[in-house]
Image (cartoon, coloured by chain):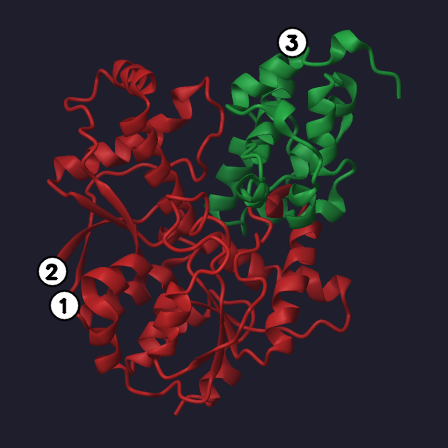
Chain colours: A red, B green
């Protein structure tokens, strides 16, 4: 099975481990990522302003590219890309005056967006297209006895109707990790923001968020926090450096992408080039594998 | 603080409502937005206080507050508001009202050594949200 794939900016440089691990994991289920031949940055965030459609052009343009390919489903790995693309798609369908304006501005595009692309996130594909039973049957039980904290962040679950699960008590991520044989902790901060783009101008804000989120995971004896967004990964992993400088008793916890965890569950070892992109070392976690 | 009757539901209030697509007059100050905000510790005015300022048209307090700029647009406030007010969207409207007249030039302080290590997603979203 092939699925049209939109990587987004960061998957090609700072988060190549996320993309490569996904390729390998999905391969085990006969799913091939079919990357769009041409794509542009989705804009990373959905613009909340009602009076300026210019910010919606970038995501809509990617949706046009997906339709040029004949795809009606577009997979994203990054939660922010997922949210931006899906919200832009819904705006296009629901708001007639904005759709007309967007079409007029993009009149140089040979084809108008017809609104037919379903934007899906990796977790949805794993659950609905591959199936959790299929995934469970291929897991090698290497993660038995390990504990993980599933971290959704914001953009996977909000706002209502766009999110992939319940906004306050989502379960899809935990259900997936459970079938690898590992245990998931009851993580109170799982849908709390990591600080997002404030990492650029106010790393101190993110250091505090990371302190709260990671300390909680540590107190629950989690071996790692599992994420699905390169910005969450940066804030929760790389920014632990800022956190430990500010909070001297802070205990680090490694952060893994869901695809890296899946690889481990399927018996595929983490590649050196993936581990190089992590700040908190993964060797303690690897020693716990069966 | 002195408030003039004419400042209530002023043109500023209407502008914020229009850009954000919400109605700030519905707020009855329950505080759920502030309670759920993950970055509230770094704000000088609480989210519910910002909504109050928006209701009574206090442009100076809104312009001088760091709150709309600390906001991470996580939407926790918006999805929890019992009156369905789009608080995160109001924060964006206040940012826009501040940025638009100055041609959207707002100095973003990025440490040049750090910039190379930041993921593109962080840089782009920061520029999108706090610059125009």
Pointer 1: residues within 10 angstroms few (<14), some, or many (20+)? Answer: few
Pointer 2: residues within 10 angstroms few (<14), some, or many (20+)? Answer: few
Query: Are discs 3 and 2 less than 8 Å apart at CB?
Result: no
Query: In whole angstroms, how far apart are the C-alphas of marks 3 and 1?
Result: 58 Å
Residue at 52% x, 41% y is B123
**Quarter of the figure that contains the N terminus of chain B:** top right
Task: Say the numbered circle drawn on residue A83.
Answer: none
Element at label 1:
loop
Q: Indicate the position of residue A136 as horizontal and vertical percent values.
A: 26, 79
Where is mark 1, residue-wise?
A30
Residue at 34% x, 19% y is A98
Query: Are discs 2 and 1 less than 8 Å apart at CB?
Result: yes
Query: In whole angstroms, how far apart are the C-alphas of marks 2 and 1?
Result: 6 Å
Q: Indicate the position of residue A155 as horizontal and vertical percent values.
A: 45, 48
Q: Are marks 3 and 2 on the same chain?
A: no
Q: Nearer the viewer, residue B12 or B127?
A: B12
- Examine the image and state in which quarter residue B81 appears: top right
- Examine the image and state in which quarter residue A256 appears: bottom left
Q: Is residue A281 visible?
A: yes
Where is mark 2, residue-wise?
A1
């Amino acid at each position: 099975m092939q699925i049209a794939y939109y990587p987004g900016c960061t998957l090609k440089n700072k988060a190549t481990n996320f993309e490569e691990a996904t390729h390998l994991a999905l391969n085990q289920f006969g799913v091939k990522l079919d990357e769009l031949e041409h794509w542009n940055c989705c804009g990373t965030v959905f613009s909340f302003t009602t009076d300026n459609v210019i910010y919606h052009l970038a995501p809509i343009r990617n949706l046009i590219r997906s339709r040029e390919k004949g795809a009606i489903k577009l997979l994203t790995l990054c939660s922010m890309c997922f949210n931006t693309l899906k919200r832009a798609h819904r705006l296009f369908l629901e708001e007639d005056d904005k759709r007309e304006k967007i079409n007029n501005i993009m009149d140089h595009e040979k084809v108008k967006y017809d609104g037919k692309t379903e934007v899906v996130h990796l977790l949805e594909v794993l659950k609905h297209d591959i199936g959790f039973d299929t995934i469970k049957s291929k897991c090698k039980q290497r993660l038995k006895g390990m504990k993980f904290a599933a971290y959704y962040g914001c953009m996977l679950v909000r706002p209502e109707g766009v999110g992939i699960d319940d906004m306050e008590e989502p379960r899809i991520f935990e259900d997936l990790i459970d079938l690898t044989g590992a245990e998931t902790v009851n993580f109170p901060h799982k849908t709390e923001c990591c600080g997002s783009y404030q990492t650029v101008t106010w790393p101190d804000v993110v250091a505090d968020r990371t302190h709260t989120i990671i300390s909680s995971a540590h107190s629950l004896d989690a071996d790692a926090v599992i994420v699905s967004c390169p910005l969450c990964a940066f804030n929760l992993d790389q920014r632990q450096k800022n956190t430990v400088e500010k909070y001297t008793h802070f205990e680090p916890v490694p952060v893994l992408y869901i695809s890296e965890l899946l690889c481990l569950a399927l018996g595929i070892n983490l590649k050196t080039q993936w581990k190089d992109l992590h700040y908190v070392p993964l060797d303690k976690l690897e020693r716990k594998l069966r | 603080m002195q408030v003039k009757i004419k400042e209530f539901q002023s043109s500023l209030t209407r502008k914020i409502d229009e850009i954000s697509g919400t109605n700030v007059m519905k707020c009855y100050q329950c505080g759920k937005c502030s309670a759920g905000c993950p970055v509230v510790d770094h704000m000088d005015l609480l989210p519910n206080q910002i909504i109050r300022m928006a209701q009574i048209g206090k442009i100076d307090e809104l312009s001088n507050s760091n709150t709309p700029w600390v906001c991470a647009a996580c939407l926790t406030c918006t999805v929890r508001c019992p009156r369905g007010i789009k608080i995160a969207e109001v924060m964006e409207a206040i940012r826009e009202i501040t940025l638009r007249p100055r041609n959207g030039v707002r100095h973003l302080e990025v440490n040049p050594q750090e910039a190379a290590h930041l993921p593109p997603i962080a840089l782009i979203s920061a520029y999108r949200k706090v610059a125009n």
